[in-house]
Image: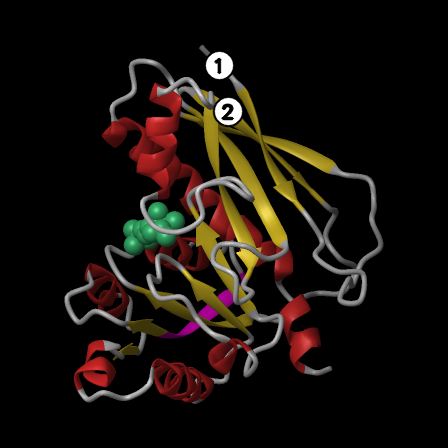
Amino acid sequence: MRVQRFFRFTHYSSRLRTNPPSPHTHSSIPVTGYSLRIITNPPSKQTPMSQRLAILISGSGSNLQAIIDAIAAGRLDAQIAVVVSNRRAAFGLTRAERAGIPTRVFPLKSYTDAGRPRVQYDVDLARLVAEYSPDLIVLAGWMHVLSPAFLDRFPGRVLNLHPALPGQFAGTHAIQRAYEAFQRGEIDHTGVMVHWVVPEVDAGPVVASAEVPIYPADSLDDLEARIHSVEHRLLVEAIAQVAGLSRNISAL
Ligand code: GRF
């Protein structure tokens, strides 16, 4: 069965909008089992400068890999200034090292073990990230909630990837909870979103989202694999979509 699915891109605030709303352009991308139609705005007349990215991870880093690959293939005009992991064992660190990208490990545990306040971790993490002068900070499977102590240092410059549609399944185990909701007959699809980060968990203005179908024969592993393949595309598209914008924001 082929199902038409959509990426949706949303400008997140009129104050920060660089281009007026304009007629959409459409293109189709074949994806195993169904297809995705990307709906986006025509490219800006201004040539966006290459973005400096700081990417925060906690695990496998397959989304980081998608960004590394897109840059290497010339599909994304960006450079990764640093990859930060809160977990030393995160495989994403190996992916970054293989690509010659600077890495930093910054675990919360050393703060909690020492009885230091959580907010101090966020302040120090922000200081560490700022050393690399990023235009855009991308949370790609980063498992800590960031407070204003971090976010206020990078206003309007922190993107998060979440494996669910806006307003659905905020927090951890989102794919499993969507799968269980499907088994109960409550939903017939789930999705993926990329959004600007606000203190509320997995909320904030949506940059891009994509619906992902769930089929009756799916195992949880099947659904996870389908969601991850959509994430890898959507995250790269979302970063490209905001390219140039975050430089403007940091200059405000
Ligand atoms: C992704 O599903 C992301 O949406 C979630 O954690 C997962 C990270 O995967 N928050 P990876 O580390 O990029 O492979």
Residue at figure coordinates x 79%, y 59% from the top left = 45
Q: Which residue is mark 2?
A: 35
1 or 2: tag closer to the N-terminus = 1
Residues 26 and 224: in front is 224
Q: Are marks 1 and 2 in contact (CB under 8 Å)?
A: yes
Q: Which of the 4 quarters of the picture holds residue 221? A: top left
In the rendered image, residue 101 lying in the magenta stretch gets the answer no
Look at the picture and state if 250 lies above or below 187.
Answer: below
Residue 50: x %, y % from top left: 57, 70
Q: Is mark 1 within 8 Å of ligand 1?
A: no
Real-space Cα distance between discs 1 and 2? Answer: 7 Å
In the rendered image, residue 81 lying in the magenta stretch gets the answer yes
Q: Which residue is mark 1?
A: 2
Specify whether residue 62 is in view: no
Count neighbours of disc 1 (C-alpha within 10 A) and say few if under 14, some if 14 to 19, many if 20 or more: few
Look at the picture and state if 170 lies above or below 250.
Answer: above
Residue 49: x %, y % from top left: 63, 71
In the picture, the quarter occupied by the C terminus is bottom right
Q: Element under label 1?
A: loop
Residue 25: x %, y % from top left: 73, 37
Residues 196 and 37: in front is 196
Specify whether residue 222 is in view: yes
Residue at figure coordinates x 70%, y 75% from the top left = 248
In the picture, the quarter occupied by the N terminus is top left
Q: Element under label 2?
A: strand
Residue bounds of the magenta highlight? 77-82
